[in-house]
Image (cartoon, rainbow, N blue to C red):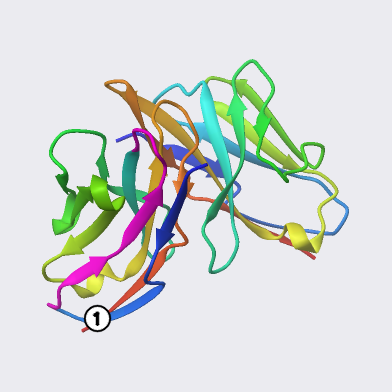
Amino acid sequence: GAVVSQHPSWVICKSGTSVKIECRSLDFQATTMFWYRQFPKQSLMLMATSNEGSKATYEQGVEKDKFLINHASLTLSTLTVTSAHPEDSSFYICSAPIAFSGTDTQYFGPGTRLTVL
Amino acid sequence: AQSVSQHNHHVILSEAASLELGCNYSYGGTVNLFWYVQYPGQHLQLLLKYFSGDPLVKGIKGFEAEFIKSKFSFNLRKPSVQWSDTAEYFCAVNSGGYQKVTFGIGTKLQVIP
């Protein structure tokens, strides 16, 4: 089946620094990828849609200047958390869809746990 | 806007018991429905999906779900759970294409040997 990887799987950083998270589709091309955030005991919340070759689309309430998304190629999207603060500590998950017969199934990466001290 | 509600947040069952996890969605148009599972320490995996056709969908590991359009429901079932089914289960919906998927809050299933 399709594989989506994320790197790093776990990162700790100091408050005020920036952290970059990579999402790669390993055996398929993805013109679109999605970034989610998952708080403890809560569901996945879509943050933004990453579009290859164009600007990302952010969900309401998500600061685009804080969460920078770059879809550099058909297999790579990056999420950079700028000037991270402790409240940004969370589990970040990306996904990429593959279309089957006009509908799509999303494949998820393993997630990146960010801890901001 | 679409939304998903899962009624049971934490379910504890003994092995061999039957399982039914409720999922209701709100969206007036054509939807695609999914159940994802997240085993401890692992990433989300697709358990089963409904796009069209037979409303009774069979997935991996003996799971099945029934789409009842009139009730806006997509409940997950398994006749006999195993300890290895201990995981968190998420119901999700999207309206087709590359549009966003909306997830329910998740149900944590604990199966006691």
Residue at (82%, 37%) from the top-left corner?
A65
Residue B27 magenta-highlighted: yes
If the image is split into quadrants, where does the N terminus of chain A sit?
Answer: top left
Q: Residues within 10 Å of mark 1 (few under 14, many from 20)?
A: some
User: Residue B109 at x, y = what percent?
Assistant: 33, 72
Q: Taking B1 as reference, is B44 left or right?
A: left
Residue at (22%, 67%) from the top-left corner?
B20
Tell me the amino acid under the disc marked 1. Leu
User: Residue A97 at x, y = what percent?
Assistant: 42, 31
Residue placed farthest to the top in the image? A53
Q: Quadrant of residue A70?
A: top right
User: Residue A102 at x, y = what percent?
Assistant: 32, 21
Q: Quadrant of residue A52?
A: top right
Q: Taking B102 as reference, is A11 left or right?
A: right
Camera-nearest residue between A54 and A8: A54
Residues in magenta, as a range: B16-31
User: Residue B7 at x, y = what percent?
Assistant: 38, 68
Camera-nearest residue between A100 and B45: A100
Residue at (32%, 43%) from the top-left corner?
B33
Q: Quadrant of residue A90?
A: bottom right
Q: Taking B62 as reference, is A50 left or right?
A: right
Residue A106 magenta-highlighted: no
Image: A21 above or below A55: below
Residue at (16%, 43%) from the top-left corner?
B55
The residue beneath circle 1 is: B13
If the image is split into quadrants, where does the C terminus of chain A sit?
Answer: bottom right
Image: A96 above or below A42: above
**Secondary structure beneath label 1:** strand
Image: B79 above or below A57: below
Image: B23 above or below B33: below
Camera-nearest residue between B61 and A18: B61
